[in-house]
Image (tube, rainbow, N blue to C red):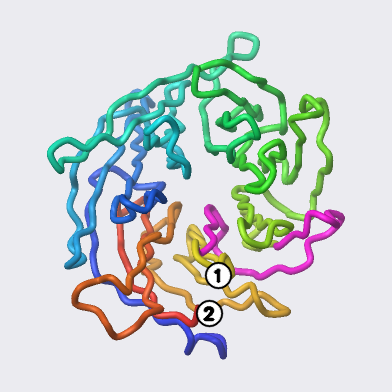
Amino acid sequence: MSMNSMNCSVELFASYDTIYPADTVEWCPIPEYNNILVCGTYKLNEADKSKTGTINLFSLDNQNKIKLIQSIPENAVLDLKWNPFIVSGQILLAAALSGNHISIYRLDEKDDDLSLNLFTSFDVPKTNGESHMSLSIAWSSLYENGSQSIAFSDSCGYVTLINLNDQLIRSFKAHNFESWIVTYNYCEPNILYTGGDDCKFKCYDQRLQFDKPIFENKEHEQGVTTCSSNKIRENIIVTGSYDEIIRLWDIRNMKHSYNNVKVDGGVWRLKWEPNKEEYLLSASMFNAAHIIDTTLDVPNICQSFGEKSNRLYYGADWCYRNNTLLEHDTKSKNKKIISTCSFYDHRLDLFFVNMKL
């Protein structure tokens, strides 16, 4: 435990059995629905190698009780991402799925009852007749004209961009082997970052037609699995990898990362704490979860938590809700809620985090 761990304590307060193995969890960023989260699952049928899953919609009440609202049978769910913007009055959730397509769901409310309903779906382009499986998905920020695009990466190394009218913008080969992750620069939606099983971390500019990357880095020693742009420190991005190292980058100098921290177990997802974007939450696969302080000269693991035996952590996220509003909790204005999900034991866990923010 690091010296800074006294500034961060974690307490498990709720668990849920997702039945199928859980691999992605996302809290809704829309203020009115900050108590809503989704958890995606992925089950492989060993007999016929078919892949199935569910999209599970949960709510968290003011007593911190978790409730399953809806479970949607789907193909295996590889990634889920809420649109951070309300578009034409719609709150939308994008799903990267095993069945060679992505689906966009709409969050509807009727008589105080919430449900996810299919808004549109899009087939993943084939290459030489070969079907691809989408692996990650990302929403752009709004362009100057108010439009928005969605990017998804796939199992054949491609990255594809579409818009909400189901129109293909571009599909291009970004990596050899799997493209594990795609994400946009939050402050410049024309800029796209990708990471692949070829150990490469790349950046593309939509205005240059994606013909070649603006930069390409191979500092990670194994596949690059996750990447996230910082909304507040607009020059900062973070990557994670099977090599167990989280790397911080300044886009003004991409020859080398400017900082890194080893978390062990491989890194699958990294999420910035939504308010100040100084702390990182890591789903560290075989080594549970970590909270990392990036404000110091050297990134500091201020808390490691979660059971490790027979667990594989693929998902982690911060709740956007301001927890000073919790009815029964006036002790700490710095209490946050985070969630993790683990694969082998099909479990969704929710934690309180007391931290110096």
Q: Is residue 328 above or below residue 76?
A: below
The percent coordinates of residue 232 (x first, y second) are: 63, 61
Q: Is residue 219 above or below residue 330?
A: above
Which is more N-terminal, label 1 or label 2?
1
Report the residue at 49% width, 82% height from top: 356
The local crowd at label 1, few if under 14, some if 14 to 19, many if 20 or more residues have their Cα within 10 Å, is many
The percent coordinates of residue 190 (x first, y second) are: 71, 36
Farthest top residue? 129
Query: Where is mark 2, residue-wise?
Result: 302
Kindly indicate whether the residue at mark 1 contacts the one at mark 2 (C-beta within 8 angstroms).
yes
Q: Residue 267 in magenta?
A: yes
Q: What stretch of residues is rendered in magenta? A: 248-273
Q: Residue 310 in magenta?
A: no
Q: Secondary structure at mark 2?
A: strand
Q: Is residue 224 visible?
A: no
Q: Nearer the viewer, residue 176 or 11?
A: 11
- Image-quadrant location for residue 188: top right
Query: Where is mark 1, residue-wise?
Result: 279
Report the residue at 33% width, 46% height from top: 39
Report the residue at 52% width, 29% height from top: 134
The answer for how far apart the CA atoms under marks 2 and 1 are is 9 Å
The percent coordinates of residue 35 (x first, y second) are: 29, 56
